Amino acid sequence: MLHLPKRIATIGSHSALQILKGAKDEGFETICICEKKKVKPYRMFPVADEIIEVDSFKDFLKIEKELIKRDAIVIPHGSFVEYLGVEKIKKLKVDHYGTKKILDWESDRGKQQKWLTRSKIKMPQIFKKPEEITKPVIVKFHGARGGRGYFLANSPEEFYKKIAQHPCERDYVIQEYVVGVPIYVHYFYSRLNDELEIMGFDKRYESNADSIGRVAAADQITANIQTSYTIVGNIPLVVRESMLPYFIKIGERVVAESQRMESPGLFGPFCLEGIVTQDLILTVFEISARIVAGTNPYTNGSPYTCLRYNEPMSTGRRIARDIKQAIERNQLEKVLG
Ligand code: AMP
């Protein structure tokens, strides 16, 4: 017999403000687990009914029993996965929204590639060895926080020259640099009604990639400016309406393939992250199997959720509604994993 959870909890970072606000709007009590040094925003914006302070998010396991006692459901987000790590999350006993099984697929590049390829999603070419570089590539470090340290190269020689500045980095991927506009597609798939929703789109605001165009090419060369991709914020976006059928189709394929891969498959919020090229195809370089920070501009709903709901519906609130509906239908196990 499942107990009825009364509280929604998450760790204070990434999209916590939105998640907690959405949970409150759906009538849940909320808990924010905060690092002492980063607690101020969660006091300034009153979305947490309770704040549990820890010295470090690494102490999360120490407060797990407290969360279980309070009947909490934990909502994972990007920082949650980053701070706890996949293995620790898998061992959590506190209720967890979304399936943990998909974490393996998401964190393993090979598996992610298999998943997307089988979903017939276009991906950038991967160069296994630097010697194979024949076109512009972007070099990404595994676990790099918010794009920090990525660099571009156009040849094996340029790669070796630039990688020498990162002597400690062993784990990286060399990806074809795709020319187009970056687009992050926010989806929500509910197992309860077997429906896929487009929640919104965003583009990232990256330093200095998004400012380098303010400097003339000749000056960029003179000043030896290298492009960097450190994320600073997110910018809301709407796409051409005629592209919506395409974005819906690829989202549906990703969900269907995840169900074939590992029952029960992916559910809740997820995001396809890629570049739309001039032929209007999204080349996907990453999938996030949870809420992304790009949904944060839509705390009060997006231009798309506005069309479906007669109330402000953020992705955080949509998660809380999924949980609430599951409780009402006595199917809570369908949203936990
Ligand atoms: P990521 O950390 O993978 O989300 O990438 C950070 C940023 O790097 C993206 O928002 C894009 O601006 C850029 N980027 C990543 N992969 C590619 C690619 N294959 N081609 C072009 N730009 C990319």
Image (cartoon, helix red, strand yellow):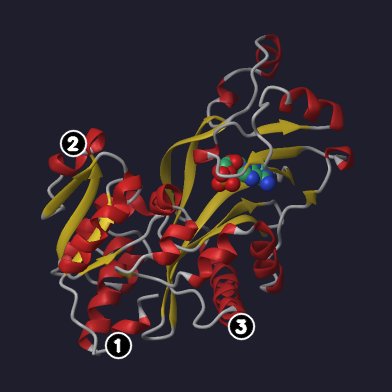
Q: Quadrant of residue 193?
A: bottom left
On-image quarter of the C terminus: bottom left
Percent from the top left, x then y, of residue 2? 24, 85
Check disc 1 and give the amino acid type: Gln
| Residue shown at the point (12%, 53%) measured from the top left | 50
Q: Residue at x 68, y 22 (%)?
A: 165
Would residue 199 be visible to someone looking at this image?
Answer: no
The residue sitting at 23% across, 55% down in the picture is 63
Crowding near the residue tagged with mark 2, few <14, some 14–19, many ≥20 C-alpha atoms within 10 Å: few
Q: Position of residue 99 (x, y in %)?
A: 44, 72
Q: Which residue carries the number 3 mark? A: 260
Front residue of 165/291: it is: 165
Q: Judge from the rendering whether residue 276 lies leftward or rightward of residue 1; answer left or right.
A: right
- The residue positioned 15% from the left and 49% from the top of the image is 51
Residue 331: which numbered mark, if any?
1
Tag 2: amino acid: Lys
Of the numbered discs 3 and 1, the one sitting upstream in the chain is 3
Residue 96 is drawn in which quadrant? Answer: bottom left
What residue is pinned by disc 2? 40
Contact flag, marks 2 and 3 (Cβ < 8 Å)? no
Q: In the rendered structure, which amino acid carries the disc numbered 3?
A: Arg
In the image, residue 107 lies at what x, y percent? 57, 58
Q: Is residue 264 above or below residue 251?
A: below
Location of ligand 1 given as a quarter of the image: top right
